[in-house]
Image (cartoon, grey):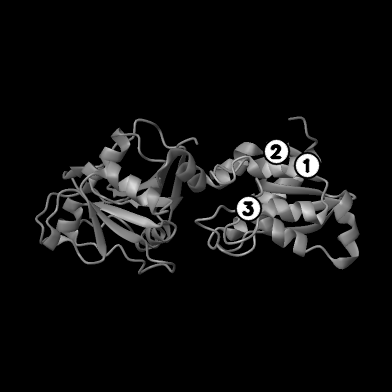
Amino acid sequence: MNIPGIEEKYMRRCLQLARCGAEGAPPNPMVGAVIVAQGRIIGEGYHARCGEAHAEVNAVASVKPADSALLAESTLYVSLEPCAHYGRTPPCAELIIRSGIPQVVIGCIDPFSKVKGRGVRMLRDAGVSVLVGLLEDECRELNRRFFIFHTRQRPYITLKWARSADGYIDRKRQADEPASKISTAHSLMQVHRLRAMHQAILVGHHTLLMDHPSLSLRHWSGPEPRKIVLGHIEAHDVPPSFEAYDDPIAMLSALHSQGVQSLLVEGGRETLQWFIDHNLWDEACEEVGTISLHGGTPCPTIPSEPQTVEKHFGATVNHWLKPL
């Protein structure tokens, strides 16, 4: 669509605002909204917390009384299609219509089945001029997890492992021996931060029996993710805080039906490689340590080069991000 650069500036402001809800909005999408009249922003807002007011509501509420008359000649920019259904909050499309805003520019369509074009239709039926697709790729990318969950009917899957400098995730050892220490204190904190960003975390049955992991957030704050073990394991070996599944496909279906949008896989090589081989992953992080193990369990392999390689306090992190 042929839209002047100034309009892209307003949508980028929407994206900037939306990111302010990164911690509170999920599992709802991050959304930002900006209201422009006579060449200036008269109102803006974002979705701060799940269950609370949406970005459009906060943007309209932020308009000063002295500027309220300008709503009738304004344009609302919003990164995601306004909702058109009654959930925890009333439909934002109705609010826009009642506010008298004559034009709306939308970044991308909401994939949620109760919206998915209905917001646009409601606005247009009320006589509002609607443009869709401004910075669409960036708007979709902002809410990768939300889009994957609703379009692929499964949680967003992140794979995470640490490997030695010579390519092993662990040395050969017995169950009563501690695992190899590849992560540093700083990278361990980052792992726990990653856990806090996911609703569920998974390990394979071998990792559970060998390491008895707590999968806690000892080095970061946030809600504890649901803990899952995958594979054939006796009921008496499953800790009370864990959920056990034999079939990974059935597990993903169950998590989706329960509204779990994001899953972090921290299992051993066999578990990680299964997700890679079945193309059931969306993001992967590989920490490369400085120690060498000179043999042991080889790290999983992804048949592509990482998009980014970063260095943090002596550790290298390879990062893969699949396209939506």
Image coordinates of residue 81 in percent, x first then y, are 65, 45
Task: Residue at 60%, 56% (x, y): give it.
Answer: 86
Q: Residues within 10 Å of mark 1 (few under 14, many from 20)?
A: some
Q: Is residue 266 left or right of 322 when viewed as pictured?
A: left
Which comes before the other along the chain, label 3 or label 1? 1
Query: Residue at label 3?
Result: 31
Residue 209 in the image: x percent, y percent? Answer: 15, 57
Q: Is residue 136 left or right of residue 178?
A: right
The reply to whether dot 1 and dot 2 touch (C-beta < 8 Å) is yes
Report the residue at 75% width, 41% height from top.
Answer: 125
Q: Secondary structure at mark 3?
A: loop
Q: Nearer the viewer, mark 3 or mark 1?
A: 3
- Residue 64 seen anywhere in this rendered image of the structure: yes
Task: Give the left or right position of residue 297, taking residue 250 as reference.
Answer: left
Residue at 37% across, 40% down: 281
Precedes in sequence: disc 3 or disc 2: 3
Name which residue type carries label 2: Leu
Type of amino acid under label 1 = Glu
What numbered label is drawn on residue 7?
A: 1
In this rendered view, identify the residue nearer to me: 84 or 236. 84
Q: Which residue is nearer to you in this view: 10 or 246?
A: 246
Disc 1 versus disc 2: distance between alpha carbons?
Answer: 8 Å
Q: Which mark is residue 134?
A: 2
